[in-house]
Image (spheres, coloured by chain):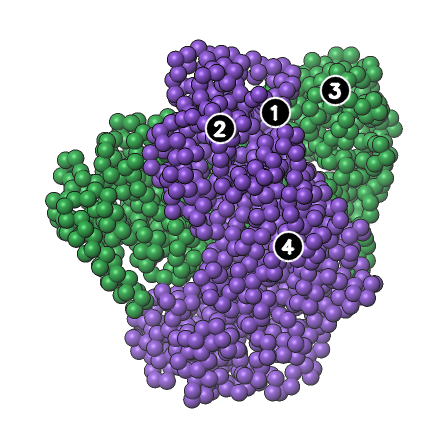
Chain colours: A green, B purple
Amino acid sequence: MPGEIVSTPNPSPLPSSLPKSILTDLAVNISLENVLSEDELHSIRTFRRAANYIAAAMIFLRSNVLVETDLKETDIKPRLLGHWGTCPGLTLVYAHLNRLVKKTGSNMIFVVGPGHGAPGILSSLWLEGSLGHFYPQYSRDKNGLENLIKGFSTPEGFPSHINAEVPGSIHEGGELGYALAVAFGAVMDKPDLLVTVVVGDGEAETGPTATAWHAAKYLDPAESGAVIPIVHVNGFKISERTIYGCMDDIELVALFTGYGYQVRIVGNEGLDRIDEDMAASMDWAVQEIRKIQKAARDGNPIVKPRWPVLILRTPKGWTGPKRYKGQIIEGSFKSHQVPIADAKKDDEGRKTLQEWLKSYEPAELFNEKGEPVQEILDLIPNNPMGQFRDTYNGHNPISAPDWQECAVEKGTQASSMKIVGKYLDKVFRKNLKAIRLFSPDELESNKLSSVLDNTSRNFQWSPSSRAKGGRVIEILSEHTCQGLLQGYTLTGRTALFPSYESFLGIVHTMMVQYSKFVKLAKEVPWRNQNASINYLETSTWARQEHNGFSHQNPSFIGAVLNLKPEMARVYLPPDANCFLATMHHCLESKDYTNLMVGSKQPTPVWLSKDEALDHCRKGASVWKFASTDNGEEPDVVLVGIGTEVTFEVVAAAALLRKLAPNFRVRVVNVTDLMILGPTGSHPHALEEDQFNELFTKDKWIIMNYHGYVNDVAGLVFGRKGVAERMIAAGYREEGSTTTPFDMMIVNRVSRYHVAMEALQRTKPDDADELVKKLQKELDDTKKYIMDNGEDVEGTYDTPSFD
Amino acid sequence: MPGEIVSTPNPSPLPSSLPKSILTDLAVNISLENVLSEDELHSIRTFRRAANYIAAAMIFLRSNVLVETDLKETDIKPRLLGHWGTCPGLTLVYAHLNRLVKKTGSNMIFVVGPGHGAPGILSSLWLEGSLGHFYPQYSRDKNGLENLIKGFSTPEGFPSHINAEVPGSIHEGGELGYALAVAFGAVMDKPDLLVTVVVGDGEAETGPTATAWHAAKYLDPAESGAVIPIVHVNGFKISERTIYGCMDDIELVALFTGYGYQVRIVGNEGLDRIDEDMAASMDWAVQEIRKIQKAARDGNPIVKPRWPVLILRTPKGWTGPKRYKGQIIEGSFKSHQVPIADAKKDDEGRKTLQEWLKSYEPAELFNEKGEPVQEILDLIPNNPMGQFRDTYNGHNPISAPDWQECAVEKGTQASSMKIVGKYLDKVFRKNLKAIRLFSPDELESNKLSSVLDNTSRNFQWSPSSRAKGGRVIEILSEHTCQGLLQGYTLTGRTALFPSYESFLGIVHTMMVQYSKFVKLAKEVPWRNQNASINYLETSTWARQEHNGFSHQNPSFIGAVLNLKPEMARVYLPPDANCFLATMHHCLESKDYTNLMVGSKQPTPVWLSKDEALDHCRKGASVWKFASTDNGEEPDVVLVGIGTEVTFEVVAAAALLRKLAPNFRVRVVNVTDLMILGPTGSHPHALEEDQFNELFTKDKWIIMNYHGYVNDVAGLVFGRKGVAERMIAAGYREEGSTTTPFDMMIVNRVSRYHVAMEALQRTKPDDADELVKKLQKELDDTKKYIMDNGEDVEGTYDTPSFD
């Protein structure tokens, strides 16, 4: 076969001592006879040759892109960037998915774990015409091909990793570990959808992937589509052997059988039969999926359905140069990135590159106009994956019911989470199959269990929820929750991720990766907007009495603060009504990363529903009911940001009113953190006069902030004239299993600390004496807590200002 | 058996359709005949009864701790905090580990994944006398027992989760997922050590745990000890069934066989035989471990040794109340935390509690002095786990060789990583078995491969490294790297974690958890200091040409900034010599979290070795060679923090010198970020006069910072009078696969941006004209990059100031 370099397979792993019966009993055997017609086989092989050729050329060439003459130094790019090693495996899969889609007419998304294999995906997208469909400069002709090859990994072309600019993509191809969960999220509530996901054997080593295999156990075959996972075992990471590459077939079959799958190993019939092998394996996979789905949809769901998984063994950098300057390239880590890094300057390198590229016989792959030859076009389905609308069509907005129907009476005490749980129940009822909640098993603890009033947990391995749907998935893996949320959101739906505050940081970098995808998606004209991703943080450090120090970490706020401002939203609603208004707003918003932080404990409802709406719209306001400045210029401004620390601010104002009736105190609550930054730094940042109206022009600002002071200080830094008159307190990594008020004390955000700070900074006449009084009250309180193991009764009664 | 409540087992999982042969062929069968003598059995059961009694009492009682009279409301704590559900499983394991240690004399550490099971561990530690050994108030008598029970989960007692105050612990019991990797890290290079680790079936769902099972593949049986992992399957998380609890035995056996283990299921013989079962299983596990170790140590290592794993099935909250007010408690999620939450106020609750506690027959467990009865003492080994020195004895400092021997010549260009790699090779050679390097397969890419000159990767599943030792472990799981590093460090050794900058954030919360452990450890008088944990970040956003946007994320700096100041250290050494000095310092330091950030690309060596030493000691200094203020008061201070952005600052100074020879520019480099905070905020924070000497009292400070501006701004916020005269630039989430200089441009930290900012802020006479000139140069450069796909030649030549 021209251009088909027959290659040695991977270096074999050491054989395990496990019984061979595992393999014979459990691995799926399929006959490869008559799987493909000769024409089909030819089409597939030609597609692969073309895709591999273009991918290799993209890494190296800036001109002479079809190698019509001998390569010259000037034909080679000045900076060789890109990753070759994974590409041939990806083009193999792509070719066969084309066949499958063409044959079955399926809706298919391809989630590519090895996102640095962008050349292999872009070349396939060009061949199927999807690049040309979205980008005129990459038309399916000589000009388009030249632009694609020349532009790749240069400042104006496609970057080296898959991102939102790549048609068909719903996953940022950078940080490894998340492709599998994203694939499972995408198929949820889309019964006709298939998502094929390739997990490289590098990515397979990550924790997030290792547990995401269990995500199949949360897939209801009646209401959702299915995933075809392919573990691509090519044996090497950047420079070390992979774990999966060193496992023999028996170990792999045992492992994935244990995960709950039926396992088919692709590649054992030799590379010359790999196309028949892959075609037969994909047909088998779809057939198994249809069996499982049919049973469930007919009302006779299979107990613990064993979904298919394919394990694909091909050499790393397959079809690339076998050796270069004495070193093995194909089938080794040396082909991970650029296999001939000195191709520009070195004659032997250029010669080797030319031989390699010529081995695909490019002259036979394209016609004189530079279009792919007919046998390639024969493979392309009418609905190619790169143009599947669910990947770019944006979201169907949910209909968020009126939150005011759930509002609670001002002056009472209410748990924000309990109230929000009731509201979410309404949201679920009104938006069947359009919204989901992913949580690491904390709904009950977070007092959000009302969301389960009319729906249930969807865990197919559990007797109670099998094949009966359910909007809630609780898996104790924040990574899986986040991956599911991403896949679900990027295919047009809305999702919510409630979590203990301290543990959202587990997905810090995942969230950043996702936001990088969305940042680019917003710049891509053919992509529509999606729902925001919505985080609800509760069980915060301020009320962690059950769990103590290890459960105290408000760092996720900082993660969101460092995103691009146009996407970052952080809310700390001070009461249940404000939380409702915020939730309503977030669920209807688009393309943001919304972080909502609040308490699950009963706390005062400070604002009526109308006041709450007004407060949330403004992002911050003066709380006149708690202020003692009578609308005049105050002596000091006390600012609360966050539920519990705001309570302390209000209590401090009450203390000061009693102790120093003439001391004019203004109380401000900030519910939208983003108002604080310098004007222009964020869409919500207040204008200078608005800022000064709230915080005065020159008075001391005593800020009691829920998170790390460094975060809020960094935010305010550029505000003119503020650093000199503002002091901030927040969580300072102090605390244990102790009482709620002791947490305030040890982190120096208690009402006493706030009041003392106010006096010490502003120095009214009797400041010293008052501070002494306050210090004594503080000491007495602390002693009471230590002696009695509980807070002084009445500590959390709403302070009166009458 | 008195107090031994015979219980229903877990709700059975749905049976899978997998062939039963998996179970018969692969699960380990052991005879339980004659495993335990009657005395042994009695001792074990009595120990468990006592431990369970104390654990339950700790959650509820503030007085009448032996329930010598009927419980009254006042006997119950005002706030019921703690987690019961996991405790009985932990005490079962503890009892049997005592037996094992006593029988074999093994060195044993117990790593407890379900760290919220602190009551069960603390009760066991009290019974064995370890609490009394370290804490006189918890002596093994009535007084000590009363203090333990009363104090638990109150402000002065032990907190509800295992932390550094708990004897024998080397793992913070909060965020789940990391116990397994910590256990593997602890046994490395300690051939005689056994570590038993319990992984709850909640924790087992996490990604970090799911992949840490592979850590056994990195354990060299000749040079390291072994781990006995126990998966404790009790079926429930906080309120949802667990995945593992819903897997049947066949699925579990297949899964763990696939991971590479021999699987023994404990509990299938019924709860009344669980002690024989557990004893026989532990004996079997140790025997298998010894076989593997002996073979390797005799020079005939077993290929792919199958280490043992135990799967323990007991009901959640076993021996607790069966039902309460109509709800099932034992064997359900209702026993996760406090099973009878209203025990204080509710008569039925108090009665149920009393019956429960009495069922253990406390009067038979302790003698009249409150000491445990003899049959319990008979079980305690001479070297109980809570007093094993490796868990608290601190570290054997490594001997860090003289870094100056690796120093490079000032004025040349050198890759910091290449030079540091050579230094680390020396460190390894000088400190055999005392230092390790954990990395997610990036050594080669990070240009640190010299560390492999005299050692190798230790991956037992790979043919090349099998049973031959090696200081380096490269697994593509940052979580596993971090867990191994923690276990290795907390048992007295030194470790280094090099990583792509963007991906260290993956372990953000893990690092915070670890630092919480260390923070407490420093306050515990009987714990000695350990080595610092050392992170080396390279392949930073500033030089990510191969990978682009997805690989740009400097957020780990912020994670370290929010730690307790006495533990947080962040260094951004500007050249190879400074990096060497910093590495030397960090490797010899204690109890810190050291983060070192630097470039892998060749960059100028600005400082000689003596100058580098001086610069690093000070943390920051004026770079006179690049300044043009001739030692006078400058017009502006340009500050570089980080390799590439400092280069731009130096280049900006050179530009300004050319354009505006009379404009006096001072160049400052900050290598120790912590000098910047307000005086007193951090041990390294400069005194105000030191700060002003560097940065002047009133001139503009134009800061070019490597990370997110918010982080450095937050740090500087409290510095008097600085916010008004400082402007900072840094990474702003812009970039793609582009040229190095374009990255500087799009993030507005290029030499042109620095120079323009300086001029615009300070407004010298010809500012406008000069800015125009600079803007044109910038535009031309940008155009050149776009047209040519590379940077202008000479961009990275060292600027001359002669």
The residue wearing badge 3 is A76
- Image quarter (top left, top right, bottom left or bottom right) of the C terminus of chain B: top right
Tell me the CA gap for discs 4 and 1: 35 Å
Circles 3 and 4 on the same chain: no
Hey, which residue is sitting farthest bottom in the picture? B368
Kindly report the distance in space between the C-alpha atoms of the residues bearing marks 3 and 4. Answer: 48 Å
Relative to the observer, which residue lies in front, A600 or A746?
A746
* Dot 3 and dot 4 residues touching (CB under 8 Å): no
Decide: is A43 above or below B405: above
Three-letter amino acid code at disc 1? Thr
Q: Chain of mark 3?
A: A
CA distance for labels 1 and 2: 15 Å
- Residue B197 drawn at (x, y percent): 60, 64
Q: Residues within 10 Å of mark 3 (few under 14, many from 20)?
A: many
Residue type for callout 4: Ser
Q: Which residue is mark 2?
A: B667
Residue at image position (75%, 66%) is B293
Which residue corresponds to the image point at 54% horizontal and 34% vertical from the top-left?
B642
Residue picked out by circle 1: B798
Task: For mark 1, name the chain.
Answer: B
Residue B375 marker: none
Please report, as a chain letter, where disc 2 is located: B
Depth check: give the residue in front, B295 or B15. B295
In this rendering, the label closer to the viewer, 3 or 4: 4
To which residue does mark 4 refer?
B399
Q: Nearer the viewer, residue B687 or A97?
A: B687
Q: Return the x and y of residue B415 as percentages of the image width and height.
A: 65, 34
Residue that appears at 55% across and 58% down: B530
Residue A558, image x and y in percent? 44, 41
Looking at numbered disc 2 in the image, what kind of residue is underneath it?
Val
> Would residue B111 be found to the left or right of residue A358 on screen?
left
Specify whether disc 2 shares its chain with disc 3: no
